[in-house]
Image (tube, rainbow, N blue to C red):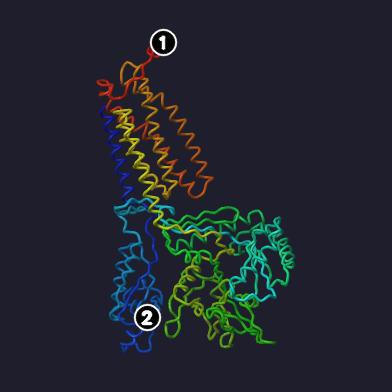
Amino acid sequence: MFRSRAVQYLGLGLLLLVCLAIIFYPIGASPEPQDYTVRLTAPQPFQQLAQADKANAGKTVSQIADAALLKAFPAGEKLPPGSLTVLADGKTATLEDKATTRAEAAARTARIEAALSKAFPGARLAPATQSAIAVLPQTPIAQAGRYAVYPMQRNTAIKLGLDLQGGVNLVLQVRRALFTYSFDKKIGADADARDAFEAQARTALASNTALGLDEADVSLAPGTSNVLQVRTQAKDQTQFAAQRAAITQALAGVAGVKFKESREPQFFVPKAETGQALGLDNYSETLLDQTVEIVRARVDKLGVSEPQIQRQLPDRIIVSLPGVNDPQKAVSVIGTTAQMEIRLLPETLAPVEDPANPNNTLFRNQGGRGDIVPANVAREMSELVVSGIDVEPTTTAGFVGEAGSEPGIFFQLKGEGARRFADVTRQVAGKNRHIPVFLDERCITAPVVQSPITGGRGQISGGFKTVEEARELALLLNSGALPAPIDVVENRTISATLGKDSLLKSLYAGAVGLALVAVFMVVFYRLPGLLANFALVIYCLLNLAVFILVGGTLTLPGIAGFLLAIAMSLDTNILVFERLKEEMAIQPTFAAALRAAFSRAWTAILDSHVTTLIAATVLFFFGTGPVKGFALTLGIGVLLSLFSAISVTRLFMWSVAGTGERNRSLFGRAVERSNTPATAVARAR
């Protein structure tokens, strides 16, 4: 018996060591290459430093940096051309690099600094570089396939959710249909006048509830153009056609305004190039699934820690971004459709600058009266050469142009797209033909084809105010275009201060509650209560370790589920201890009473845990967001409660069974039984 108990304690000790290792030595995915930004500062503008060396005469900053980096890094590690980006102040430059771990990034940045400080004397790494490196994973202690063990950290490896860490919560809706109308009333740029006109149109549609037009999104197109857009959630082509007729009829009743369709209405269906045949039955779910995957790819490239992306049928997506402090950037990156197309402009159209937006391009009809043609109309009149699906996911941002000061992106076409692009540019080279680049329905640039563009490499410039805008477009192109536009229907920001305050209050309340329960257990159950408190500590460590292993994210409801599971674990001990009191009045020895107490309490313990586990399972599979967090912590706690109460507490109790034989008062006062036939039968057993 002693040897068996010693083995059990040894196994329990090893289990605790494993739990502590999981909690403080995180086990996670093996590190993979990640993007990080190297920021450098110089005492003088980089352009002046470049011109100071006569050997660099006629070279741009980008060319000088490329040459220096090419010497510093072997061919297999070299950075892409145009990596160095000089910011507006001229004295600050950034460079996008990739590294797997902090140590690798530190070594690479040291080589980058050494190389560029020679090319640009006085250039040094800015402190922001260390912050960028700090978010990369540490070098693992050990790796096994897809998993790795990382060095011990001061804080636990528990991931905090949005409500504890702060961040942004977005509710996105996949747009199903878009109806576009022009009208003859002058609205201008006055915000109040525009709001009043939108309200007038919205009122005209609100009476049609049968087709869902009362929930339609009605808004004027950006700028001063007289264009009204109506977005609906048409379920299928039949409802789409019915909505088209109903909207036209409703707008005809708006007093003093004449509407007409300015373009063909759009019903957004996943593109045929996805390779998936879609019917009306699976249209909604497939469209949502495709959108979720692209949103997930974009969020991953934002570098958000532990984002949560959940679909909500029929057409909504909930995105939680813990730690994000710039909600507008998140919205612009996640919500932009990013359908990029390069088209061949017909000879009858010529690009002109948009007077309202220098980063936008309009078109002039060279025949007739020379009317201005909007970008969306010019797009439909142009021949498609390549689109976003033809672009390799390796697009980078930088400065282009002869002076190396214009923001732009570098892209690489793949397969058939590269061949088609080369053929078209070869046919029209030197003929003053334009190949405009459209992002969604905006033309960001319309260059002239001077010579054939072979090899699939190209660059886009002219449509970006800053290099940050170019970098965002590169991110969007690398993650893929959305199959349909999405609208942000809710944008809720939670401050980190609120999250920290909530966490501290929750932990404080939990600690006070546990302390009171621990005192109660010792006062009411004496030595078994003390042993139950020790078992509870082990239970908490087991719970945290399993929670980390399954990849759970701790939220306020999750803390509630954890505390409820602790209460159930103590309740399991209470059932055993109460049964022990009864058995001590019946059984001839303390060992027999202890054995009977665990045996006869098992049925009640199992029933309560199974019913709670069923409830937690239902909540987990049918709930969303915080409900899932509550169900996960509760379910893990219930399962571990059985192990803790039945195995750990039993081991502790049997270890002091000899004390129970000598002094039963340490185990609580036995329940007095009257000398009835039933009692006599029980004693006979």
Whether residue 551 appears in this view of the structure is: no
Mark 1 or 2, nearer chain start? 2
Structural distance between the alpha carbons of marks 1 and 2? 98 Å
Q: Examine the image and state in which quarter residue 180 appears.
A: bottom right
Rendered location of residue 158, percent (x, y): 37, 50
Number of numbered discs = 2
Q: Residue at the location (32% across, 28% down)?
A: 525
Please state which of the two labelled residues, at mark 1 or mark 2, is closer to the viewer.
Answer: 1
Circle 1 crowding by C-alpha within 10 Å: few under 14, some 14–19, many from 20: few
Q: Nearer the viewer, residue 406 or 200?
A: 200
Q: Are marks 1 and 2 in contact (CB under 8 Å)?
A: no
Q: Which amino acid does label 1 sit on?
A: Thr
Q: Is residue 272 left or right of residue 146?
A: right
| Rendering coords of residue 244 (x, y %) | 71, 64
Asked if residue 95 can be seen in this view, the reply is yes
Question: Which three-letter amino acid code belongs to the residue tagged 2?
Answer: Gly
Please give the label number shown on residue 676.
1
Query: In the rendered image of this protein, does residue 443 appear above or below residue 141?
Result: below
Relative vertical location of residue 409 with respect to residue 288 in this rendering, above or below: below
Q: Which of 393 and 263 is in front in this view?
A: 263
Identify whether 445 is placed above or below 539.
Answer: below
At x 62% / y 71%, what residue is drawn?
193
Q: Position of residue 325 (x, y in %)?
A: 42, 62
Q: What element carries label 2?
A: loop
- Left/right placement of residue 328 relative to residue 212 reads left
Res 314 quadrant in image: bottom right
Q: Mark 2 points at which residue?
A: 90
Q: Which mark is residue 140?
A: none
Q: Which of 328 and 634 is in front in this view?
A: 328
Secondary element type, mark 1: loop
Quadrant of the rendering where the C terminus is positioned: top left
- On the rendered image, what quadrant is the N terminus found in? top left
